[in-house]
Structures are given as structure tokens and as C-alpha cells.
Image: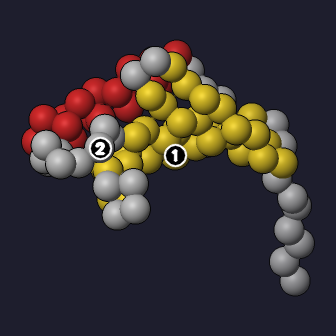
């Protein structure tokens, strides 16, 4: 969990080393609701959820809002270590 001072909100982050499943949204929304109930004050903005998943050669950053999920795709580059 993070807090963004500029956005004035908590951010719940989950890392999944697989593709997104539909139950992932419900799980992170559960955590977002807990943060809103237990930590968030009235002057804070709504909690944001982020699920980072991997699909083939792409990282997908899924922004979770109450209305749905907004996916952003990033190509992975292979790194060679000597």
C-alpha cells in the first residue's frame, strides 16, 4: 500500500505473475474498501487500486476504479546478465 501526497489518496497495489482473472478485481476492491473504512479520512480522495499482471511479453498495469478496470500495456525487454 502506498500514499500519494499530490493525489491525496491511498493506493493499493497487487502484483500477479500471471494474466488477470475476474476475481482479482473483487479482491483488490475488498482491500480498497478496508482502506476506506479503516484509514481514509474525509479529506482524502478515493482509494486507487493497481493490479500489475504479466501476459506473454507484456506487463499490464490495471487501474481499478469502482466503475471498472483501465489496462495499460508495456512490452518487456529481455535483459542479459553477464
Q: Nearer the viewer, mark 2 or mark 1?
A: 2
**Residue closer to the observer: 34 or 40:** 40
Q: Is residue 31 left or right of residue 78?
A: left
| Contact, mark 2 vs mark 1 (Cβ under 8 Å) | no
Q: Residue at x 49, y 41 (%)?
A: 50
Q: Residue at x 23, y 30 (%)?
A: 33
Residue 60 vs residue 40, the one in the foreground: 40
Question: Where the C terminus falls, by quadrant?
Answer: bottom right
Q: Is residue 79 left or right of residue 53?
A: right
Q: CA distance from mark 2 to mark 1?
A: 23 Å
Image location of residue 40, percent across then percent down: 17, 45
Q: Earlier in the sequence, mark 2 or mark 1?
A: 1
Numbered circle sitting on residue 55: none
Note whether 81 is above or below 61 in the view shown: below
Residue 34 at x, y percent in the picture: 19, 35
Residue at 60% across, 29% down: 70
- The label number, if any, that marks residue 15 in the structure image: 1
Tag 1 secondary structure:
strand
Residue 64 higher or lower than 54, as above or below: above
Q: Residue at x 51, y 19 (%)?
A: 68
Residue sticking out furthest to the front = 43
The local crowd at label 2, few if under 14, some if 14 to 19, many if 20 or more residues have their Cα within 10 Å, is few
Q: Which residue is mark 2?
A: 45
Q: Quadrant of residue 12?
A: top left
45 vs 49, left or right, is left
List the single residue furthest toward the bottom: 82
Q: Position of residue 55 (x, y in %)?
A: 74, 35
Q: Is residue 54 above or below residue 24?
A: below
Mark 2: which secondary structure? Answer: loop
Identify the image quadrant of the N terminus: bottom left
Asked whether the viewer can see residue 16, the reply is: no
Amino acid at each position: 500500500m502506498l500514499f500519494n501526497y499530490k493525489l491525496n489518496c491511498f493506493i493499493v497495489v497487487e502484483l500477479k505473475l500471471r494474466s488477470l482473472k475476474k476475481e482479482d478485481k473483487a479482491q483488490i476492491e475488498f482491500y480498497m474498501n478496508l482502506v476506506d473504512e479503516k484509514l481514509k479520512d474525509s479529506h482524502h480522495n478515493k482509494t486507487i487500486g493497481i493490479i500489475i499482471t504479466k501476459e506473454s511479453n507484456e506487463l499490464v498495469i490495471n487501474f481499478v476504479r469502482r466503475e471498472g478496470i483501465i489496462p495499460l500495456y508495456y512490452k518487456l525487454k529481455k535483459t542479459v546478465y553477464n
